[in-house]
Amino acid sequence: MKTPKHRKKDYKKTAEHFGVTPKEVETEISAAIKAAYNQPEGSAAKEFFTKLFPHGKLPSNKEFIEIMAARCVDGNEDD
């Protein structure tokens, strides 16, 4: 799956800030999502993912970023 242009810009800016490549940023975001998603049942991370992604599938970087951005804009960070 191709990375959308606006996301490429975000990855590029983040990469420049941290002195890494945009691909490394994309890979690390994916790894962080997977690590949080794979936490044991009953953990805060697992409850968080179950609440935000009730379909039970690991979200893509795109899905995760869009939901998190919407939560921040809507002021629902505390849910």
Image (spheres, rainbow, N blue to C red):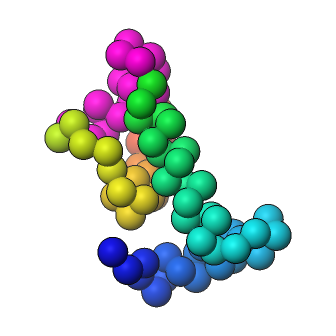
Residue 46 at least partly seen: yes
Instruction: Report the magenta residues as a range.
Output: 40-54
| Image-based side of 2 in relation to 78, left or right | left
Q: Say if the magenta span includes residue 53.
A: yes
Q: Which residue is farthest top?
A: 42
Q: Quadrant of residue 76?
A: top left
Quarter of the image for the C terminus: give it. top left
Q: Would residue 74 be seen by someone viewing this image from the given angle?
A: no
Measuring 77% from the left and 75% from the top, which residue is drawn there?
16
**In the visual, does 10 lie left or right of 53?**
right
Does the magenta-highlighted stretch encompass residue 75?
Answer: no
- Quadrant of residue 9 within the rendered picture: bottom right
Q: Nearer the viewer, residue 49 or 26?
A: 26
Give residue 18's position: percent from left, percent from top.
Answer: 79, 65
Magenta highlight: main SS? helix
In the rendered image, the vertical position of residue 52 relative to residue 47, given as above or below: below
Q: In x, y percent, where is residue 11?
A: 60, 73
- Residue under the point 33% across and 75% down: 1
| Numbered disc total | 0
